[in-house]
């Protein structure tokens, strides 16, 4: 088997040991004589996986007792709706920090549920090339909550320090960078993340929610869509996506084996410094449109001198066993996504390739 | 590897060839050098799987052009909320046929969204032992829709002919029996099914919806929760549960290889006749509480003379490599779930075991 290097933005590459573990257990999970997929979500075998996934995430992110970990479905797009459905009470307004496609979509869903305003909009000349500083936020003192997107996969920007919002509940879509490094969870009231970038396969959404906030949720919405109901049954109110949660458990276990969130940060910084370093060193050929202070460690976007050369770059990458490098259709160019699972050695290979490509085409 | 016989009600046993195919492709999907889990939901490899899952279901159930197939998340519990959120307009009332735990839950969610009434309630002396006949339905002429549950996993009852509801839209939760046999899809306006019983692993919900009904859906609810939005993007409005959908594709492909829905019906009738035949032949020991005309082909529930004997039956089953036979905690007794994937030879083994157990304990 020849494994390609997969720079896709998500669903994204997974650690090979995680996949090997899944494969080895596929027909017979821990000697039970059946696949994990065939186990009841209320049986002992799956219950242990469920509990371990939760405790590993709690340990790796040092999640305090004030917060609850939930496994839900529907991805970030589901959360775009559920957050205002639960926490935007009648007569209230919520603040949204707009830094790209995903926060724009979150705002659209919020405005279907009630009032929501832009506390900042980082769009400039039609493009998102930075995230706002704290000083640029125009916060509503009475905001029901403040919502932002920590990492913007399409634009290639990332918050390296988080908005300071005082007493307002802080809600963050961390779909593309949860667990890239340690964070202080206590500063957040709600964090959510589709798993398919940094945490596992598509089909499960990780939610970390402050219990105090959860208790204020609306009770006139569908039971299945209340965080309090899901938490009250330890994410087993209904049959959850057991197999995706199992793979997440394996990913978290792999992160722990690697040294945890701090080790992930070192590894991710090493990769991003290598790649941005090369781009800056060859800035007459590779051009990062992103302000340095806002550059994403997860998704590196850059342009080449011409669209012709970008096409050639993409096809030469494929020839070299590197796929998923095409930028999002809305912005063009090249995008290299390198979540936790991306090995630094693959970024070295890419950097070598880019050095050669530049030399041959300058 | 010693494979157990898994009679769980769901997540349930899957066809061994399906699991073997998943295992063989796990690290390298069709020579792409990566797992299906790692493929972009918009890439060529996954797109082909997505399209094939849809076309196989369309073929196997002979789904007419008037209907759309969707892949969603949240299971039947999600649909309990989404159906009234979309189709219970202000001032309207919906009719629910109550035949067990799941239809009761569906009614509770409907009443959070608006008015809903019981068109029938099959509970008698605290138990659900039959489904209502057509004559017993008290339908509201103006009902926004009529909702029923085709098979009741907890009670062990099943509709063998479907309610006739005239011009009212007919909505059916077929989570536990979709594709057990051919059906006339044109009689339904909306069919939904969590995959984890007859169709695949947990984490994906199959929806078959009449386009005419879909067009009448409310537009003041979250975009992610509108059937019309999901259909408009061919179930790729957001990142779906790609791996569960892939396994469903494999299950559908297996069903086709076996001869399709008609072959499933023959196989399922063979199993159910074998098991009910034995129960009736030994009715002084094994007792089916279900009226014959309402007996489920999927979930066979029965009692033994004492709860002691039931405990002994469950542990003796486990010793014989047969698990998941305990009845739902709300009704007790024994429950044998035997969806499409359950091999008739396993029901033969169970029948032999039951014959012996009866002889030893009568």
Image (cartoon, coloured by chain):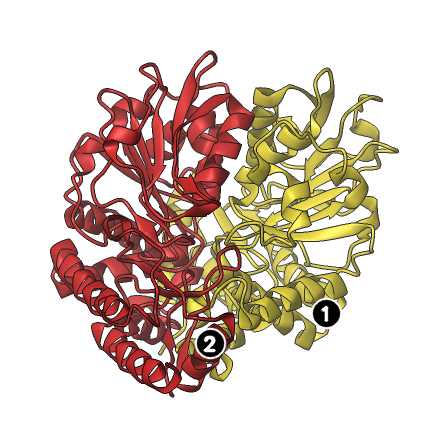
Chain colours: A red, B yellow
Q: Check the residue under mark 1 and report the chain it is in.
A: B
Name the residue rendered at 27%, 72% in the picture.
A282
Q: Is residue A29 left or right of residue A241?
A: left
Q: Which residue is mark 1?
A: B260
Which quarter of the picture shows residue A186?
Answer: top left
Residue B252 visible at all: yes
| Residue B94, x across and y down, in percent | 72, 24
| Residue A201, x across and y down, in percent | 40, 60
Judged from the image, the secondary structure of the residue bearing numbered disc 2 is helix
Q: Residue furthest top?
A: A91
Seen from the viewer's position, the closer of residues A251 and A139 is: A139
Q: State which quarter of the image contains the N terminus of chain B.
A: bottom left
Q: Is residue A275 above or below residue A295?
A: below
| Residue B340, x across and y down, in percent | 61, 63
Seen from the viewer's position, the closer of residues B68 and A48 is: B68
Q: Which residue is mark 2?
A: A309
Name the residue rendered at 79%, 27% in the picture.
B137
Name the residue rendered at 45%, 47% in the picture.
A127
Q: Do circles 2 and 1 both sit on a common chain?
A: no
């Amino acid at each position: 088997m020849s494994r390609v290097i997969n720079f896709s933005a998500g669903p994204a590459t997974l650690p090979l040991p995680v996949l090997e573990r899944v494969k080895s257990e596929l027909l017979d999970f821990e000697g039970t004589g059946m696949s994990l997929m065939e186990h009841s979500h209320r049986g002992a075998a799956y219950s242990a996986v469920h509990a371990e996934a939760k405790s590993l995430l709690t340990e790796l992110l040092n999640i305090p007792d004030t917060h609850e970990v939930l496994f839900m479905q529907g991805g970030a797009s589901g959360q775009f709706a559920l957050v205002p459905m639960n926490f935007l009470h009648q007569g209230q307004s919520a603040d949204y920090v707009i830094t790209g496609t995903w926060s724009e979509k979150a705002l659209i869903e919020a405005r279907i549920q009630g009032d929501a305003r832009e506390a900042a909009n980082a769009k400039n000349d039609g493009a998102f090339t930075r995230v706002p500083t704290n000083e640029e936020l125009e916060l509503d003192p009475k905001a029901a909550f403040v919502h932002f997107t920590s990492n913007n996969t399409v634009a290639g920007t990332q918050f390296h320090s988080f908005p300071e919002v005082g007493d307002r509940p802080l809600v963050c879509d961390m779909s593309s960078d949860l667990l890239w490094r340690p964070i202080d969870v206590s500063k957040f009231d709600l964090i959510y993340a589709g798993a398919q970038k940094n945490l596992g396969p598509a089909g499960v959404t990780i939610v970390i929610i402050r219990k105090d906030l959860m208790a204020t949720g609306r009770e006139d919405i569908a039971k299945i869509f209340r965080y309090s109901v899901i938490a009250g049954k330890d994410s087993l109110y209904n049959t959850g996506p057991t197999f995706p949660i199992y793979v997440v458990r394996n990913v978290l276990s792999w992160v722990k084996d690697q040294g945890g969130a701090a080790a992930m940060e070192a590894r991710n910084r090493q990769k991003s410094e290598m790649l941005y370093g090369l781009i800056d060193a060859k800035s007459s050929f590779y051009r990062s449109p992103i302000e340095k202070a806002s550059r994403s460690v997860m998704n590196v976007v850059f342009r080449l001198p011409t669209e012709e050369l970008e096409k050639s770059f993409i096809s030469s990458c494929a020839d070299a066993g590197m796929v998923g490098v095409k930028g999002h259709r809305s912005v063009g160019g090249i995008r290299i996504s390198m979540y936790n699972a991306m090995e630094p050695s693959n970024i070295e290979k890419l950097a070598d390739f880019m050095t050669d490509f530049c030399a041959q085409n300058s």
